[in-house]
């Protein structure tokens, strides 16, 4: 599920940037991109919770340390890309 949510978040983020460049209203795409980023993290957390309940310690040891770093980096990138049009719009108004 996290893969689907992550894919939608990526598409919505690029749609956000495209709509800004085209001069159209990008706010809905920005909200969708950020929302699906949050849903991706929640789905991943749910997957890890399932592994804990199943006591699948090898899966936790293999995946969690690497994915923790990746999720932090990708979340920060998603936030920055999604709010870039807002900052550019504010800069152009000055």
Image (cartoon, rainbow, N blue to C red):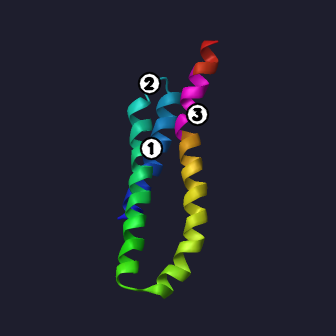
The percent coordinates of residue 19 (x first, y second) are 46, 31
Quarter of the image for residue 52 reads bottom left
The percent coordinates of residue 2 (x first, y second) are 40, 63
* Viewer-nearest of discs 1 and 2: 1
- Judged from the image, the secondary structure of the residue bearing numbered disc 1 is helix
Does residue 63 appear left or right of residue 42 in this picture? right
Q: CA distance from mark 2 to mark 3?
A: 15 Å
Q: CA distance from mark 1 to mark 2?
A: 18 Å
Q: Please identify the dominant SS of the magenta region.
A: helix
Determine whether label 1 and label 2 are within 8 Å by CB: no
Does residue 5 appear left or right of residue 91 in this picture? left
Q: Earlier in the sequence, mark 1 or mark 2?
A: 2
User: Measured along the vertical axis of the image, is residue 24 above or below residue 39?
Assistant: above
Q: How many marks?
A: 3
Image quarter of the N terminus:
bottom left
The percent coordinates of residue 75 (x first, y second) are 54, 52
Does residue 86 appear left or right of residue 43 in this picture? right
Magenta extent: 82-89
Q: Earlier in the sequence, mark 1 or mark 3?
A: 1
Quarter of the image for residue 55 reads bottom left
* Viewer-nearest of discs 2 and 3: 3
Q: Residue at x 42, y 25 (%)?
A: 25
Disc number placed over residue 93 in the picture, else none = none
Disc number placed over residue 84 in the picture, else none = 3
Q: Residue at x 49, y 80 (%)?
A: 60
Q: Residues within 10 Å of mark 3 (few under 14, many from 20)?
A: some
User: Measured along the vertical axis of the image, is residue 15 above or below residue 39?
Assistant: above
Q: Residue at x 47, y 50 (%)?
A: 10
Q: Residue at x 39, y 59 (%)?
A: 42
Is residue 67 covered in magenta? Answer: no
Q: CA distance from mark 1 to mark 3?
A: 12 Å
Residue denoted by label 2: 24
């Amino acid at each position: 599920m996290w893969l689907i949510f992550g894919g939608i978040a990526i598409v919505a983020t690029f749609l956000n940037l495209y709509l800004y460049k085209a001069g159209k209203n990008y706010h809905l795409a920005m909200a969708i991109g950020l929302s699906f980023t949050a849903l991706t993290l929640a789905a991943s957390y749910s997957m890890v919770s399932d592994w804990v309940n199943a006591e699948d310690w090898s899966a936790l040891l293999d995946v969690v340390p690497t994915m923790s770093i990746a999720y932090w980096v990708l979340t920060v990138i998603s936030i920055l890309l999604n709010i870039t049009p807002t900052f550019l719009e504010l800069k152009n108004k000055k």
